[in-house]
Image (cartoon, helix red, strand yellow):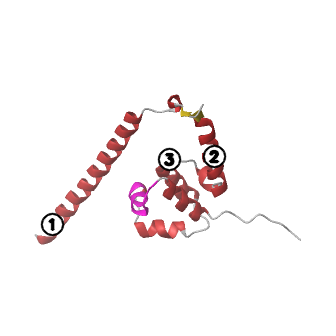
């Protein structure tokens, strides 16, 4: 009797990581330049081509390996270890912060600005196209 390991469902892993990030399908879709329906289809797929997987990993700010090897058990273990080591004599140890929250905020602002500019440019192109069609 063979006990061959069942391959991981990559789409389901993407869905869980996206949810843990607090990201909606629509936001992920915009980040990688596809429709929300495409994200839904990808999340229902057991396998995904490497190039698309790389784009998704970049948008979710995780590695491709993190998507491939994701498991609920690992997440629980991670958070248990995180909280076990974050406490010092019953008080939160504030020196564990490894990034500047203002830098992160500025990164998000810049990303949103770029997204807005792309959307604005797209709308301008649509207007130009429609004006040509009218003439």
Q: Can residue 10 be seen in this view?
A: yes
The segment highlighted magenta reads 22-31
Q: In this view, does 116 lie above or below 8?
A: above
Q: Earlier in the sequence, mark 3 or mark 2?
A: 3
- The percent coordinates of residue 39 (x first, y second) are 47, 65
Taking the spot 36% from the left edge, 43% from the top edge, the residue there is 108
Q: What is the spatial separation of the Cα atoms under label 3 and label 2, in whole angstroms?
A: 22 Å
Q: Residue furthest right?
A: 1
Identify the image quadrant of the C terminus. Answer: bottom left
- The tag on residue 80 is 2
- The percent coordinates of residue 61 (x first, y second) are 50, 47
Q: Which is more toward the observer, 53 or 104?
A: 104
Identify the image quadrant of the N terminus. Answer: bottom right
- Position of residue 90 in the picture relative to residue 55 (left or right): right
Question: Does residue 24 belong to the magenta stretch?
Answer: yes
- Residue that badge 1 annotates: 132
- Position of residue 116 in the picture relative to residue 38 (left or right): left
Q: Residue furthest front?
A: 90
Q: In this view, does 119 lie above or below 11?
A: above
Q: What is the spatial separation of the Cα atoms under label 3 and label 1, in whole angstroms?
A: 41 Å
| Image quadrant assignment for residue 127 | bottom left
Crowd rating for badge 3 (residues with CA inside 10 Å; few <14, some 14–19, many 20+): few
- Residue that badge 3 annotates: 61
Residues at badges 3 and 2 in contact (C-beta under 8 Å)? Answer: no
Q: Is residue 71 visible?
A: no
Q: Nearer the viewer, mark 1 or mark 2?
A: 2
Secondary structure beneath dot 2 equals helix
- Position of residue 11 in the picture relative to residue 4 (left or right): left
């Amino acid at each position: 009797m063979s006990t061959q390991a069942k391959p991981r469902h990559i789409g389901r892993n993407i869905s869980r990581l996206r949810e843990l990030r607090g990201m909606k399908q629509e936001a992920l879709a915009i980040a990688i330049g596809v429709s929300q329906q495409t994200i839904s289809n990808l999340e229902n797929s057991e396998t995904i081509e490497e190039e698309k997987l790389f784009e998704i990993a970049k948008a979710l700010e995780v590695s491709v390996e993190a998507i491939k090897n994701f498991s609920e058990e690992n997440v629980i273990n991670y958070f248990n270890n995180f909280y076990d080591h974050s406490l010092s004599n019953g008080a939160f140890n504030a020196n564990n912060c490894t990034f500047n929250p203002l830098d992160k905020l500025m990164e998000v602002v810049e990303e949103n600005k770029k997204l807005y500019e792309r959307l604005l440019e797209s709308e301008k192109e649509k207007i130009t196209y429609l004006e040509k069609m009218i003439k």
